Amino acid sequence: MYPVVSADTRALVTDHFTSDAHVERTLSRAATGDTTEHESLVTRIDEVAANSAGGSTILRVTTGHYSGGDYYDSLFVHRVDLRPVREHLAYLQRKIDKRFDYDGGTVHQTNASGDSVNTFDRRYDVPVFAFSEIELLVRSLPYRLGYTAILPLYSEGDDAIEMDSVAVVDARPDRWTIRFADPAIVATYGIDAATRRIVSYDVTGRKTHGKARKIYQAIR
């Protein structure tokens, strides 16, 4: 049985985070044997690490554009354990707006779609992380070969918890390789050993077998 890394444990390594900005370009291809890639998503990630009276925090803001339009996500977490505090997710052209307040294993959520507003609570036995902080989490694992754990992630798209797995599957002097798996995808992250920055990402869909990869571009 693999350990569960929840938002009330101190298993994560987070002292490397600083304010940062970069662009992620997602290149996708179908599973039919076609090797032609197309740019399916472009996102800008802004991370702001700050200190306040309540402790160190990270604000992670994502702005993206894909075939369905533009989307926006802002996530505020405690730096020491990546415990989420609040989040705002919006798909602008689709007029979908979701807001989340996290309190351990309780998620208070408000969904707005057009003129319709729905508010509800989800309660779980374990403190949850936001699914949108998966990149923060894979950069914060205790890197040692063979390490495997379960992450309780609240899926903002499904409005439900997922118990997903992460594993350290390879170690080189300059790079760690992390495998992430959930019901929909299997993804592999390459992590720079010196900075804990993500330098590569490859993903395969479980049902479609479609593939995608990301190109990371720093913003100076």
Image (cartoon, rainbow, N blue to C red):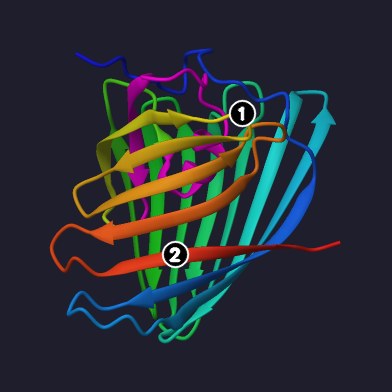
Q: Is residue 198 left or right of residue 180?
A: right
The answer to which quarter of the image holds residue 195 is top right
Q: How crowded is mark 2: few (under 14 residues within 10 Å), some or many (20 or more)?
A: many
Instruction: Pick the quarter of the image with the N terminus.
Output: top left
Q: Secondary structure beneath disc 2?
A: strand
Q: Which residue is identified by label 1?
A: 173
Query: 148 or 108: nearer the eye?
Result: 148
Residue at the left extreme, as displayed: 207
What amino acid is found at the position of numbered circle 1 in the picture? Pro
* Residue 97 placement (x, y as % from top left): 46, 68
* Residue 119 placement (x, y as % from top left): 35, 54
Q: In this view, does 178 lie to the left or right of 3?
A: right
Instruction: Pick the quarter of the image with the C terminus.
Output: bottom right
Q: Which residue is identified by label 2?
A: 213
Q: What number is the disc on residue 181?
A: none
Distance between mark 1 and mark 2 Cα atoms:
23 Å
Query: 143 or 137: nearer the eye?
Result: 143
Q: Secondary structure beneath disc 1?
A: loop
What amino acid is found at the position of numbered circle 2 in the picture? Arg
Position of residue 100 relative to residue 149, above or below, is below
Q: Which residue is drawn at 37% across and 53% down?
A: 156
Query: 142 or 65: nearer the eye?
Result: 142
CB under 8 Å between discs 1 and 2: no
Query: 7 or 144: nearer the eye?
Result: 144
- Point out the stretch of residues depicted in magenta: 130-156
Q: Which residue is drawn at 25% across and 78% down?
A: 30
* Residue 83 placement (x, y as % from top left): 54, 29
